[in-house]
Amino acid sequence: MNLESPKVTLNKSAEEAFIFLNDVKNFEKLMPDNISKFEVLGDDKFLFALKGMPEIVLEKKSQSTNPYKIVLGAAGGKIDFSLIGHIHEIETNKSEVQLQFEGDFNPMMAMMIKGPITKFIETLVTNLPEAMSA
């Protein structure tokens, strides 16, 4: 399953967007309102839970490329997936970010989680401009 968020434009350079997303603590600022738990587990790992959903641990992966791509993946658990931030420099101090969710799920599971995951990544990327200007 491959899902993509809308693209958002930031009044920040690609380098600034990468630095922000590379700091796992900043993901707390991007989370939706229905977050029930957020905990930083190290420099490259965090745990979060949304109300009514199981806890998920994400960790930075080595495929990240400064300043154009940040890759987070599931750390353990029953499902393997990646959350990829694509950062594109539009001009000096202006960049565009899009989130991509990749996971290999059976058709039934994919059908059940497609809506919530799509809404989740849209919320993360929509909250990015405000979180970076705070």
Image (cartoon, rainbow, N blue to C red):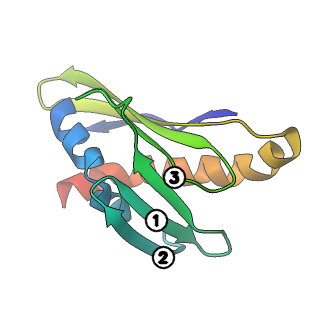
What label sits on residue 75 in the rendered view? Answer: 3
The reply to whether dot 1 and dot 2 touch (C-beta < 8 Å) is yes
Instruction: Give the labeled residue for mark 2.
Output: 37
Instruction: Give the labeled residue for mark 1.
Output: 47
Tell me the SS state at disc 1.
Answer: strand
Q: Tell me if I can see residue 7 in this picture.
A: yes
The residue that appears at 25% across and 52% down in the rendered structure is: 23
Quarter holding residue 26: bottom left
Tell me the SS state at disc 3.
Answer: loop
The kind of residue tagged 1 is Leu
Q: Position of residue 78 (x, y in %)?
A: 69, 54
Tell me the SS state at disc 2.
Answer: strand
3D distance between C-alphas at marks 1 and 2: 8 Å
The residue that appears at 49% across and 71% down in the rendered structure is: 33
Tag in front: 3 or 1 = 3
Most extreme residue toward the left is: 92
